[in-house]
Amino acid sequence: MNLAKWVEHAARAHPDVAATGWGKAIHRDYADMGARAARLAAGLRDNGPRGAGLAPGARVALLARNHPAYVEAMVAIWHAGLAVVPINNKLHRDEVAYILDAARVSHVLVTPDLAETVSGGRVAIDLEGAAYEALIADHDPMPVADVAPDDPAWLFYTSGTTGRPKGAILSHRNLMAMTAAYLADIAPIAPGDACLHAAPMSHGSGLYIVPHLAHAGTNVVPESGGFSPPEIVETLTAWPGTAMFAAPTMVNRLVRWEGEITETALANLKCIIYGGAPMYAEDAAAALGRLGPRLAQLYGQGESPMTITCLRREEIADRDHPDWRARLGSAGRPYFNTEVRVVDDDGRDVPTGESGEIVCRGNSVMLGYLDDPDATARTLRDGWLHTGDIGAFDASGFLILKDRSKDLIISGGTNIYPREVEEVLLTHPAVSECSVIGRPDPEWGEIVIAYIVGSATADTLDALCLDRMARFKRPKHYVHVDELPKSNYGKILKTELRALDTAREDAARGDVTRGTGTMEPVATKEMGT
Ligand code: AMP
């Protein structure tokens, strides 16, 4: 079944219910969005002079800041039997070009601010522009295209330790399994219940568009398109039954915000689902204190979108349970439709309490990576997705996430692969060696630190990074050293480097409190974001 069928159903059963909202206002109701999506779908497929001429199965990219038309465009793409490629709007132009090439995309739907980012003779259609409206106006609605359950619906680009992003192919079946998991284990959705998209719609927040389409929910974009506590509180007053995906950094900001979270806002807030990065138990407890029993946690990855384990609302709220604290520090239990195991290097289950790699199996697990059979074979083995995350089950089946075996930094809920940053730094002639690590940070979870051997200054390296990759990936500090810790084989020992970094930080903090000033000055640069 095509995911777009849900919108067709909603347009009949709940024509007047808001399908999308912008700020506190209704953007389109289901009758309107359903009709427009059916026309836009026809326009995307039409191979006459007025259409985009896309063949069934073709991929259409969405490169946009958060915008309510994101939802309509995505539905139209599925309606037409095409697959959507949502792209992180903060990526550098060259990084975007790489994804568009890899996914063989000819048409990109954009918000006006991003039109210039589309290169290579591709067609960029502005979601607010005349060409987009003409595609809708010039075409009669087409029926929802027939698709097979395994037909691709969403190409989810995730960067990798190889330094190049890989496209996880998510099918209609995958997103339906994710939807079932959400409805069963996170929260029910009634027609008109809202999903507030304050996090990027190309990623986790956008995935939650889908369950809200299934039950005629309302996908709402804050006016600013982003996250700011006062705006969230104000927007909440207009939308009952609101759910919101938030990275831990966002939850912490909301909880520490000194303004008032009004009773109306709280009454309308059904659920904040946090995940994508570790959340300290302390912070989860503080969030519970301020927001009440409205928090759930998800653990997932692009390869099994939003669906591996979850910590349910009632489990987070159950302060009287003897294991409550420990549970807050866990990633919860498997979703009802997902099998999760913790295995050793030979793929055998490890005993309860012992660490191993987390693997999972279920209908939400991707079909594979686009055009990358080697990476697919490494990641999907005997039907199990190897997550690259290390964890352990406790006696009651709650999963504790320990570490990542993949070299990955998660800063503010966003993944940054050190290898990508290292490759850029190493192009500087005055960098002979470098190693990029994550340093624990109370606000961001982790921040990016580059250890450099060579004379290139922090300023020149910062300029190089800005020129070559997305701003958010660039190091916050550069530390110049004479050599990096290495194994006998010459491999840089990141674990040792992280320990050294912690020791340096501790010493520096000690210096500040004692005021002895014994630490060597290091070449660091505060970037801010
Ligand atoms: P992505 O594929 O970009 O969604 O990133 C997925 C990775 O984020 C996972 O493999 C984990 O390492 C991490 N992650 C996701 N959810 C959680 C969570 N609830 N707690 C800790 N780390 C998480």
Image: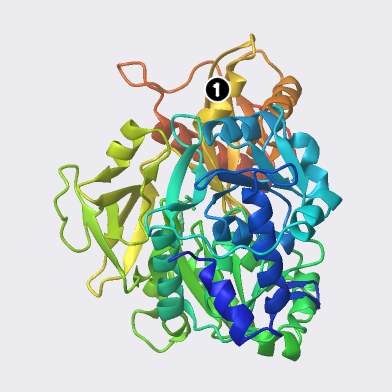
Work out whether residue 32 or residue 48 is closer to the camera in this orientation and state it. 48
Residue drawn at (43%, 47%), measured in percent from left and top? 169
For residue 222, which quarter of the picture?
Answer: bottom right
Give residue 519's position: percent from left, percent from top: 62, 31
Residue drawn at (79%, 40%), measured in percent from left and top? 115
Please indicate, yes or no, whether residue 528 appears anywhere in the rendered image. Answer: no
Q: Is residue 339 above or below residue 356?
A: below
Crowding at mark 1 (Cα within 10 Å: few <14, some 14-19, many 20+)? few
Give residue 475's position: percent from left, percent from top: 64, 34
Q: Is residue 239 left or right of residue 175?
A: right
Work out whether residue 340 or residue 514 is closer to the camera in this orientation and state it. 340
For residue 229, which quarter of the picture?
Answer: bottom right
Please indicate, yes or no, whether residue 368 appears anywhere in the rendered image. Answer: yes
Residue drawn at (60%, 35%), measured in percent from left and top? 100
Give the farthest residue toward the top.
429
- Quadrant containing the C terminus in the rendered view: top right
For residue 372, which quarter of the picture?
Answer: top left
Residue drawn at (54%, 71%), measured in percent from left and top? 273
Residue matched to label 1: 423
Give residue 381's position: percent from left, percent from top: 23, 44
Q: Is residue 336 left or right of residue 502?
A: left
Colour theme: rainbow
Q: Is residue 485 above or below residue 31?
A: above
- Quadrant containing the N terminus in the rendered view: bottom left
Amino acid found under the numbered disc labelled 1: Glu
Work out whether residue 519 or residue 373 is closer to the camera in this orientation and state it. 373
Q: Is residue 50 left or right of residue 414?
A: right
**Residue at disc 1, secondary structure:** helix
